[in-house]
Amino acid sequence: MKKVLSCLLAVILSAIGLAGCGAGGNAGGEDVQRLSQVEVYSADGNLLGTVTDEDTLLRFSGLDYTDISSDTDAEMDILESKTENLKVLYTIISYKAPVAAYNDGNPEKLMELTVYEDSNIIKEQIAPETIRGGYVAEEFLTFYTTVSDEDKNFILSLAEIKK
């Protein structure tokens, strides 16, 4: 009887593990987290361009933040203080495709990135409306981090895409 229960438990755990391996991806194996478009605005708020190309959206969703560690609060405070003297270059707003049956068909704001001149520091603000079922203060949805030179160049290239 113990052998049968052990085998049954092993089969169930294997099935759960294999099911988890396929979760979260689309048919092509790439996941853009329902990202539907990215809009790039100048520092004064003028729309510079809209990105809807799936390859570009996939790369945007895979940006690598290089300074994430266990002590992010202290690091973010340092990065935030450094941005006080930096000039804002662009604001980039990403949108995701709505999934709710009652939606109006418009994309939902996902996050806003602030890009600074002569710095790899970016400010990321998660849109409060993406948090369902409760209120989260904006201070807990704002993150300061750095990106690699390669990712910074990619982010800057988004501003060259026309409307």
Image (spheres, rainbow, N blue to C red):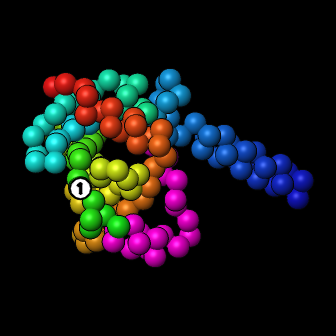
Q: Position of residue 20 (x, y in %)?
A: 60, 44
Instruction: Write down the quadrant of residue 160 in the picture.
Output: top left
Q: Quadrant of the N terminus?
A: bottom right
Decide if residue 100 is on the left or right side of residue 163: right
Residue sitting at x 90%, y 53%: 3
Residue 40 at least partly seen = yes
In depth, the one of 2 and 128 nearer the eye is 128
Q: Nearer the viewer, residue 140 or 80?
A: 80
Provide the residue span drawn in magenta: 61-81
The residue singled out by tag 1 in the image is 87
- Above-or-below relation of 73 to 31: below
Q: Nearer the viewer, residue 128 or 38?
A: 38
Amino acid of disc 1: Lys
Whether residue 116 is in magenta: the answer is no
Relative placement, left or right, of 160 versus 70 is left
Q: Quadrant of the C terminus?
A: top left
